[in-house]
Image (cartoon, rainbow, N blue to C red):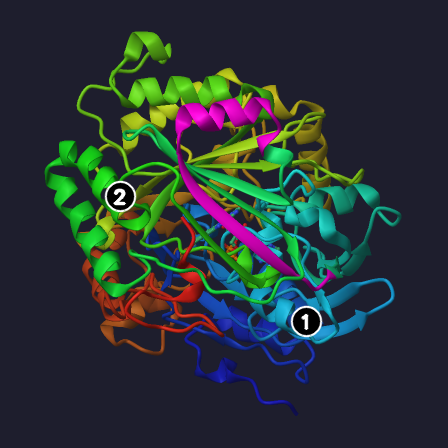
């Protein structure tokens, strides 16, 4: 009989009864006391069980048990989504141990993978066959399933979302069935699963379309924003295979980054100030000081980007490297991100208005929120996408029928501290985006989006997504409060699903970020008091678990915090050294852009 670590769990007696009814040969690999947090440490939660299955039967067993134990299931990739999307007090499934390459078809240029694979690993495996992912965002750390689930994108007029390279996928639904779908097979399920927000089921396998492995030459130049707006009229975004812009509003300059395929020999970038440790730490400290003296920020922008690029316009940096690393960049520190899509043609106007607002010109910007005392971080990230596929996700963030511009308002969290300007900046930014029928990036930190707004911009596509979702998961096993607050209609219109997880409390942590507690840390339905075990009562029998939930959550905060504190590794979790890069005084080669 296969061994299962389940005997080490403190679980209600009903759990053991349900487990016994299932095939003992299939392990249930679960642990407790796992503390989940997002990459940016914006949110923390403690799931009742943290489960890492290694096969489809194991994943099916998790779903079957969850259904019988009346539990919500959240699948988490590597938690790079900075919102509370992946927070849960119920069961958390992670597919890091289900992340192998299953097949590479050189002729069709496809790779079939287990869905937990990280994109970095996928690209390394593809390279062995002379292939690579057609497009990437700024990083390749994400799980493939997590990246497609939130409509992750890069910046190119020749590509849409990463999801558009999905040829087919297999998903384990709430009834435990593993179902394959593609544009030809169950197309509705396929379109819903292409950007699923984790609310459809557990995606277990993905067949992904690749392209020929190649090198890119990238060139970045710092220019006045007037020059960028002029170039915009002359085909800025189609001038190279990949183009992106970083907007520096206070200096009224922008960094233009372009890359195209090349056969030139590899070449490293010449100089990079904040990729090196002196620049990296100086910038971080300056951002921290600005927490207390926000009006310092325009000077920080001038100084940091001056040190990086020179204080005059026109200086250029370039390199030749593999596409799979050339598209990546240094995201520096923990951050809030608020990214929206608007029609590309509205970009110059939207950016001009936003720049005016940041400069304090409320009237000229036409944004009815006071910019007084608001100072923001730089840069604003400006990217494009252009859908190439006809089988598009229902929740595609690209603008329908026209090329898309993505604007990303980043606010760093220096040393884990939330920036003071966030609420009003994002209020103003979201107001502006909504004037252009903006669609929020699903993974990010938007604050004024609900079903009514999404209905107005997604129309029947949102209805179709919800129809499919509700059909395949009628009990709401994969639904949490993020989904309720964002995409689902209010409870008055769509009653709470039996397994839907409600948020009970969220609290600011002293060390930055938010603790999130959901309803399923409850005792009355046979569940486990996930906190009582921290007091050392170990065996977790149900009689020990009765406590008033709210009071319990309050009382146990210190226990949760202590554990979270222990979990913090180093102050510099953000700094990542990648495979194939060199660390030196001037930094890591791959961290040279922007
Ligand atoms: C530093 C950084 C840089 C980034 N750069 C970009 C960028 O350039 N472009 C861009 O568009 N986005 C970018 N993002 C956002 C990022 O791509 C998304 O947050 C992505 O969803 C993260 O993938 P993940 O594996 O961490 O998924 P998670 O954040 O863990 O999960 C995201 C969603 O996927 C679901 N999910 C995960 N696995 C499965 C599965 N097997 N089955 C079903 N559902 C599943 C989860 O339930 C959740 O709903 C960036 C984020 C960070 C932190």
Q: In which quarter of the image is the N terminus?
A: bottom right
Q: Looking at the image, is mark 1 or mark 2 earlier in the sequence?
A: 1
Where does the image place residue 245, in percent across and percent down from the top left? Answer: 47, 38
Q: Nearer the viewer, residue 225 or 109?
A: 225
Where does the image place residue 319, in percent across and percent down from the top left? Answer: 50, 58
Where does the image place residue 191, in percent across and percent down from the top left? Answer: 74, 42
Please name which of the two marks, 1 or 2, marks the residue nearer to the observer: 2
**Residue 306 has which mark?**
2
Where does the image place residue 561, in percent across and percent down from the top left? Answer: 22, 61
Residue at disc 2, secondary structure:
helix
Q: How crowded is mark 1: few (under 14 residues within 10 Å), some or many (20 or more)?
A: some
Residue span colored magenta: 212-236
Residue at 51 percent across and 40 percent down: it is 244
**Residue 137 has which mark?**
none
Residue 559 lies in what quarter of the image?
bottom left
Rounded to the nearest angstrom, the CA distance separating label 1 from label 2 is 37 Å
Q: Which residue lies furthest to the top in this view?
A: 363
Residue 125 lies in what quarter of the image?
bottom right
**Residue 127 has which mark?**
1
Residue at disc 1, secondary structure:
helix
Residue at 28 percent across and 38 percent down: it is 377
């Amino acid at each position: 009989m296969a061994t299962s670590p389940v005997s080490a769990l403190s679980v209600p007696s009903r759990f053991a009864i349900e487990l016994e009814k299932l095939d003992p040969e299939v392990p249930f690999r679960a642990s407790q006391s796992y503390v989940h947090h997002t990459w940016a440490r914006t949110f923390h939660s403690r799931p009742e069980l943290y489960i890492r299955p290694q096969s489809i039967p194991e994943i099916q067993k998790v779903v079957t048990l969850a259904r019988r134990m009346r539990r919500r299931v959240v699948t988490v990739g590597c938690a790079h989504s900075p919102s509370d999307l992946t927070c849960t007090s119920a069961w958390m499934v992670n597919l890091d141990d289900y992340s192998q390459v299953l097949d590479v078809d050189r002729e069709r240029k496809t790779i079939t993978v287990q869905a937990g694979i990280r994109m970095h690993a996928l690209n390394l495996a593809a390279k062995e066959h002379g292939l690579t992912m057609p497009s990437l965002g700024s990083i390749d750390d994400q799980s493939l399933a997590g990246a497609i689930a939130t409509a992750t994108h890069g910046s190119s007029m020749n590509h849409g979302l990463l999801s558009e390279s999905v040829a087919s996928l297999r998903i384990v639904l709430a009834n435990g069935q593993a179902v394959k779908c593609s544009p030809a097979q169950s197309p509705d399920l396929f379109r819903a699963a292409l950007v699923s927000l984790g609310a459809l089921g557990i995606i277990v396998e993905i067949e992904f379309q690749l392209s020929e492995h190649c090198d890119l030459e990238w060139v970045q130049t710092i220019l006045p924003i007037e020059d960028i707006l002029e170039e915009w009229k002359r085909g800025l975004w189609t001038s190279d295979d990949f183009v992106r812009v970083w907007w520096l509003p206070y200096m009224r300059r922008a960094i233009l980054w372009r890359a195209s395929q090349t056969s030139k020999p590899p070449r490293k970038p010449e100089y990079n100030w904040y990729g090196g440790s002196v620049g990296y730490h100086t910038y971080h400290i300056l951002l921290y000081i600005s927490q207390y003296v926000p009006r310092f920020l325009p000077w920080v922008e001038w100084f940091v980007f001056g040190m990086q690029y020179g204080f005059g316009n026109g200086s250029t940096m370039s390199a030749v490297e593999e596409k799979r690393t050339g598209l990546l960049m240094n995201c520096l520190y923990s951050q809030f991100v608020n990214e929206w899509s608007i029609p590309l043609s509205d970009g110059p106007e939207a950016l001009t208005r936003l720049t005016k607002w940041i400069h304090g010109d409320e009237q000229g910007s036409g944004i009815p929120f006071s910019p007084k005392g608001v100072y923001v971080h730089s840069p604003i990230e400006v990217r494009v996408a252009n859908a190439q596929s006809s089988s598009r996700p229902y929740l595609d963030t690209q603008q329908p029928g026209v090329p898309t511009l993505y604007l990303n308002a980043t606010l760093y969290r220096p040393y884990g501290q939330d920036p003071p300007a966030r609420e009003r900046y994002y209020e103003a930014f979201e107001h502006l985006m909504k004037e252009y029928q903006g669609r929020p990036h699903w993974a990010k930190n938007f604050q004024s989006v609900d079903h009514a707004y999404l209905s107005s911009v997604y129309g029947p596509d949102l209805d179709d997504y919800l129809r499919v979702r509700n059909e395949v998961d009628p009990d709401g096993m994969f639904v949490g409060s993020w989904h309720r607050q964002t995409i689902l209609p209010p409870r008055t219109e769509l009653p709470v699903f039996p397994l839907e997880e409600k948020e009970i409390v969220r609290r600011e942590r002293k060390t930055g970020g938010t603790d999130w507690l959901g309803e399923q840390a409850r005792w009355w339905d046979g569940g486990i008091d996930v906190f009582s075990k921290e007091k050392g009562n170990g065996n977790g029998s149900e009689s020990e678990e009765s406590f008033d939930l709210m009071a319990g959550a309050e009382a146990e905060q210190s226990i949760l915090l202590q554990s979270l504190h222990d979990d913090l590794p180093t102050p510099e979790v953000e700094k990542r050294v990648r495979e194939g890069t060199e660390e030196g005084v001037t930094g890591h080669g791959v961290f040279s852009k922007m």
